[in-house]
């Protein structure tokens, strides 16, 4: 019980850190791009590093945001067919969906691994950092999302997912309810 609480708390704070990183990336992008626009308009100069770094922050923001959205069930999905299936059909569809996502995450990790040596030696033109610092996010994203997939598959196989949670698509109208449930789960 204590171990479960420690794990749950660690996961909660890990995703809070990811949310903070999304905010930091967004603020940094706005400051860099806006500052560059002002410098170019007012002083006919600019900071070349800000163009490149804002692109890199955008890449990280996108992938970090995808991890947070996956945990919260905020990704887009189509439930037109699945919601009309019997319970067994919903379970099969959830199993196939999570298995395919797990497979894709494995491919994503493998692709990042195969490109690792190239990206270590590929230096960004302006900032001068190895591009693995940009594209290495593939390691983090594939591992975190795979853990989420494995967790859902484990809960499905062991019968820990209730029948009303088998359709994992959240409609916009139900988003406030999901957020309320997330808050209730954390307490």
Image: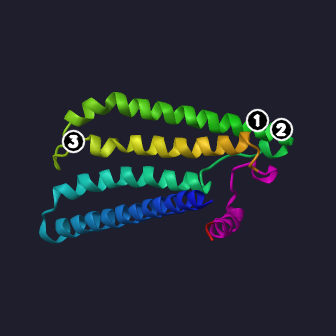
Q: Residue at x 70, y 50 (%)?
A: 168
- The residue wearing badge 2 is 88
Of all residues shown, which one is farthest toward the front?
2
Q: Is residue 104 left or right of residue 139?
A: right
Q: Secondary structure at mark 1?
A: helix
Which of discs 3 and 2 lies nearer the camera? The answer is: 2
Numbered label attached to residue 92: 1
Of all residues shown, which one is farthest toward the top?
114
Quadrant of the rendering where the C terminus is positioned: bottom right
Magenta stretch holds residue 170: yes
| Residue 17 vs residue 81, the one in the foreground | 17
- The residue wearing badge 3 is 130
Q: Residue at x 72, y 43 (%)?
A: 156
Is most of the magenta stretch helix, strand or loop? helix
Q: CA distance from mark 3 to mark 2?
A: 49 Å
- Which residues are the magenta region? 162-185
Q: Secondary structure at mark 3?
A: loop
| Residue 52 vs residue 87, the one in the foreground | 87
Q: Position of residue 1 (x, y in %)?
A: 63, 59
């Amino acid at each position: 019980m204590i171990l479960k609480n420690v794990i749950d708390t660690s996961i909660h704070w890990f995703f809070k850190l990811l949310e903070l990183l999304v905010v930091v990336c967004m603020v940094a992008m706005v400051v860099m791009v806006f500052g560059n626009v002002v410098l170019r308009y007012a002083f006919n100069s600019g900071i070349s590093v800000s163009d490149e770094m804002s692109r890199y922050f955008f890449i990280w923001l996108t992938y970090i945001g995808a991890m947070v959205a996956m945990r919260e069930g905020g990704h887009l999905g189509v439930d037109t067919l699945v919601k009309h299936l019997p319970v067994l059909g919903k379970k099969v569809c959830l199993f196939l969906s999570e298995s395919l996502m797990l497979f894709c995450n494995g491919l994503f990790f493998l692709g990042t691994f195969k490109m690792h040596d190239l990206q270590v030696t590929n230096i960004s033109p302006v900032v001068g950092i190895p591009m693995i610092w940009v594209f290495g996010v593939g390691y983090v994203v594939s591992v975190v999302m795979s853990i989420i997939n494995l967790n859902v598959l484990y809960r499905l196989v062991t019968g820990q997912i209730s029948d009303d949670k088998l359709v994992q698509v959240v409609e916009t109208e139900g988003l406030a309810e999901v957020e309320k449930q997330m808050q209730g789960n954390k307490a």
